[in-house]
Image: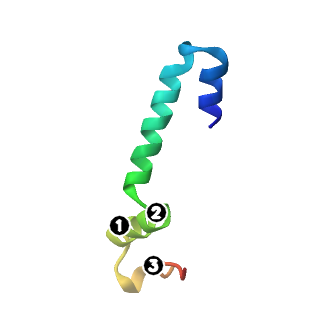
């Protein structure tokens, strides 16, 4: 919302900034929940079960 305000208040020179932020936000939303992504990353890159320093499971909702 702040980027939209800057563009509306200060003009089209800031439009590329707004476009980039809007695009990045859409990409992040398409990737899904950040907690789920972090858990998937850990599952893929984690040590074998006996060597894990922490439990890797989805938190209770």
Task: Describe the element under mark 3 as helix, strand or loop.
Answer: loop
Q: Residue at x 55, y 13 (%)?
A: 13
Q: CA distance from mark 1 to mark 2?
A: 18 Å
Q: Is residue 11 left or right of residue 21?
A: right
On residue 6, which mark appears? none
**Mark 1 closeness class: few <14, some 14–19, many ≥20 residues within 10 Å:** few
Q: Position of residue 50 (x, y in %)?
A: 39, 86
Q: Earlier in the sequence, mark 1 or mark 2?
A: 2
Judge left or right: residue 44 versus residue 35: left
Question: Viewed as shown, does residue 49 lie left or right of 54?
Answer: left
Residue that mark 1 sits on: 45
Where does the image place residue 2, in percent across and percent down from the top left?
65, 34
Extreme bottom residue here?
A: 50
- Which of these two is toward me, 59 or 43? 59
Quickly name the residue at label 3.
Answer: 56
Q: Which residue is mark 2?
A: 33
Among the two numbered marks 3 and 2 on one chain, the one whose residue lies closer to the N terminus: 2
| Of the image marks 3 and 1, the number of the one nearer the N terminus | 1
Query: Where is residue 1 drawn, in percent x and y?
Result: 62, 37
Report crowding for label 3: few under 14, some 14 to 19, many 20 or more residues within 10 A (C-alpha).
some
Above or below, comparing residue 45 to residue 60 in the picture: above
Residue at figure coordinates x 39%, y 46% from the top left = 27
Label 3 – label 1 distance at C-alpha = 11 Å
Residue 45 screen position, x and y as percent: 35, 66
Residue situated in front as seen by the camera: 39 or 51: 39
């Amino acid at each position: 919302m702040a980027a939209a305000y800057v563009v509306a208040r200060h003009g089209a020179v800031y439009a590329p900034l707004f476009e980039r932020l809007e695009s990045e936000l859409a990409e992040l939303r398409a990737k899904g929940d950040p907690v789920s992504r972090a858990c998937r990353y850990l599952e893929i890159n984690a040590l074998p079960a006996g060597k894990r320093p922490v439990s890797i499971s989805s938190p209770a909702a």
